[in-house]
Amino acid sequence: MAIALLAAGCATSQPDNGNEQWPSAEGDQAYTAEYDNDPLELPNRFVFAFNEMLDFAVFRPLAVTYRFLVPELVRDSVRNFLRNLSTPVILANDLLQGELGRAEVTTTRFAINSTAGFLGLFDVAGGMGYEYHDEDFGQTLAVHGMGEGVYLVLPILGPSSIRDGLGIVVDSYLDPLTYVAQNNDAEDWMFARRAVAGIDFRSRNIETLDDLKRDSIDFYARIRSLYRQTRANDINNGAPGTQGPTPGLYSLDFDFDTEGEQAGASAN
Amino acid sequence: MFAAPRSPYRLAAVALSLVLASAAPQAARASDAEQAGQFIAHLTETAIDGLTDESVPTAERESRFRQLFNANFDVPAIGRFVLARYWRVASEAERTAFLEVFEDVMVRRFAPQFTGYAGTRLEVTKVQPLSDGKQFIVSTRITPPKGEAFTVEWRVRDGSDGFRVLDVIGEGVSMALTLRSEYTSVIKTTGSVSGLIDELRKQVAGGG
């Protein structure tokens, strides 16, 4: 199954890293199914509905309870601790992307927060200008030119893609803690860590997701678009329109109908 | 390849004309860019002044927002962009109906968002002209009285009747592109532009 998905992903992946999401100057053919890059929409919608049900029954209530019971300072420390634990994976991906400056920030953060920050419970480094950033192998693959394959909704984990799903697997192999856990029969801890990270994330997005859902008329399509745009932004490290792999947003074409009768009305 | 070393003067002339050609529009654009930045600064200032006061009745704030939205956003262009290729197949009546309900959706969605933003500060950090010379990306840093500052980029176009906003990009997410993705998906599901219009009307009626 996974192999088949991978094969499908390679067959449709574009060298220009998801540019096909953005209509180019020939805006007319502007919008066909390919721009959503979602040939697996039917199974994806099924998994999405399953995830939503789980979220409604389990994750959202857990997140609400967690936020209600645990003081903010403690929740922040939980997040700081988890972030500090993921340093090796972030550092590896910084380096694999050739981002030496960011690698240095990651290393400095780890040195400061593991010591002055009491084993990572406090983000002392952030206050000194060494801001946290995330990296993962999905982004590394994108930086090196791999397209996203196709959009994919993973059970429990949510929106992803062939490339990003592959990234999750590789990241777990890049993480020294995976091996530490294996050698000590402590794989449950790895699971617990993921679960806590998930609840932490969910608890920080309760209102945002409620809002997004309330005023959407196709929640699935909205989340798909948000995920893909956010990933493109992450891959470019927040610099859209630069010479990165995704020129994207700035080249959207708002003029594709200028030959139509509306031409005089708004096209300069 | 061979010509280059034999004609250094021509090369110099080409280089010079390139410099001049790129410098001239640059100078012209600088002031346009400044104006684009001022347009956004003024727009957000007006919005924060007029829409954050919760003692003003909701209906009044909604009508203020509607007026600001229509005067400063290129609603027809956004509507066309959002419907993408379905704009072409839509009938004139559908286009009008869509733009009408689209405006209502925007008002319902964004008018209430301003409460809690009284005293928000906005700083234009960069204005970048796009290749057509008519459009600009205005980057702003928005600092609410509570919570963290965030970055919003405004895509504006200098048209015959002044500047108009085409898109709002928050932390790398484009509003126009997100709506396009969602709306075209609904058209596909319901089978027609009328289907989308019905869904949007239901949303507006439901109080969104």
Image: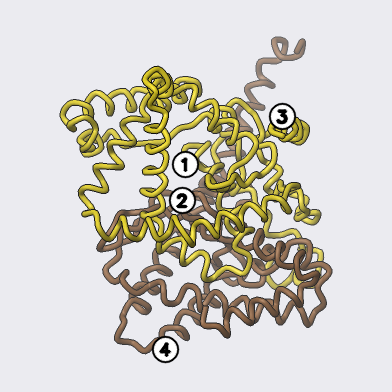
Chain colours: A yellow, B brown
* Chain-order first, disc 2 or disc 4: 4
Callout 2 touching callout 3 (CB < 8 Å): no
Residue type at tag 2: Glu
**Residue B105, how many percent across, how many down?**
57, 76
Residue type at tag 1: Gly
x 41%, y 72%: residue? B113
Q: Chain of mark 4?
A: B
Spatial CA distance of label 2 from label 3 is 35 Å
| Circle 1 residue | A238
Q: Residues within 10 Å of mark 2 (few under 14, many from 20)?
A: some
Q: Is residue A178 above or below residue B99?
A: above
Q: Chain of mark 2?
A: B
Q: Quadrant of residue B122?
A: bottom left
| Circle 2 residue | B171
Callout 1 touching callout 2 (CB < 8 Å): yes
* Chain-order first, disc 3 or disc 1: 3
Spatial CA distance of label 1 from label 2 is 7 Å
